[in-house]
Amino acid sequence: QQQVKQSPQSLIVQKGGISIINCAYENTAFDYFPWYQQFPGKGPALLIAIRPDVSEKKEGRFTISFNKSAKQFSLHIMDSQPGDSATYFCAAIMEYGNKLVFGAGTILRVKS
Amino acid sequence: DTGVSQDPRHKITKRGQNVTFRCDPISEHNRLYWYRQTLGQGPEFLTYFQNEAQLEKSRLLSDRFSAERPKGSFSTLEIQRTEQGDSAMYLCASSRGGGEETQYFGPGTRLLVL
């Protein structure tokens, strides 16, 4: 019940295209859903986050879509650039919780 | 504004040796977390501090692992009698607390046990 399932495992997108990464969860006590971007040899960096009372959140080229009834959320990267090539992790945390539960990650490669 | 810092960035040790890692959180962040990340996986929670109190420990944290945050500022993670299975990236994160859940991660310490 603590798991967050992420797909796809890897993704190749042409420059200028849309990258879409999906996550699903079971625990309805999860209350906060961040996405992290990680480059090789670096720690995860917060990209964007959403709470379940909002269906969509957009920051620049990055959009989270949230479907509370389906217990699914996704990250859309518009106009994908080679610099976006990285590993992306979805995560979840319970209200007043202490630990992030991460998905397994998606390796994104944007071809120029 | 400095982010979370970790030291060392890389550590190579022989099996059976003890190692200690340090984490300096963002100043005024009350909460500090340790995670472990193995190749191709997402980070996994190890332990969490609220100020100097260690409030939660994962089952992943065997008795060879100990973490401290003596004055509620920096934290250390020690691994005794290292095993090859301990090879991983050890990540530290901090958050403001008080309902603010956003966790900010440091660059990590990559441990290789030979």
Image (cartoon, coloured by chain):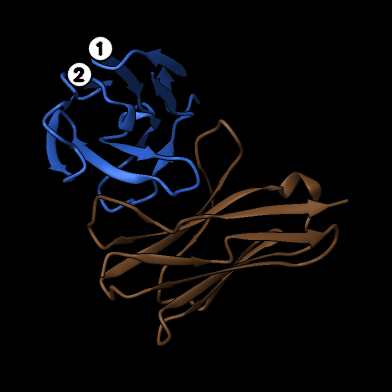
Chain colours: A brown, B blue
Q: Which residue is mark 2?
A: B81
Q: The residue under label 1 is which amino acid type?
A: Gln
**Residue A101 falls in which quadrant of the image?**
bottom left
**Residue B88 falls in which quadrant of the image?**
top left
- Position of A45 with respect to B89 (left or right) is right
Q: Circles 2 and 1: CB distance less than 8 Å?
A: yes
Residue drawn 28% across the image and 15% down it: B19
Q: Which residue is mark 1?
A: B17
- Chain letter behind tag 1: B
Label located before the other in sequence (2 or 1): 1
Q: Count residues near mark 2 (Cα–Cα under 10 Å), then give few for <14, some for 14-19, many for 20+.
A: some
The image position of residue B95, as x and y in percent, is 34, 41
Residue B26 against residue A81 in the figure, above or below:
above
- Position of A84 with respect to B61 (left or right) is right
The image position of residue B42, as x and y in percent, is 43, 49
- Chain letter behind tag 2: B
Residue at disc 1, secondary structure: loop
Q: Residue furthest right?
A: A112
Residue at disc 2, secondary structure: loop
Is residue B27 visible in the rendered structure shown here? yes
The image position of residue B29, as x and y in percent, is 31, 34
Q: The residue under label 2 is which amino acid type?
A: Arg
**Residue B43 falls in which quadrant of the image?**
top left
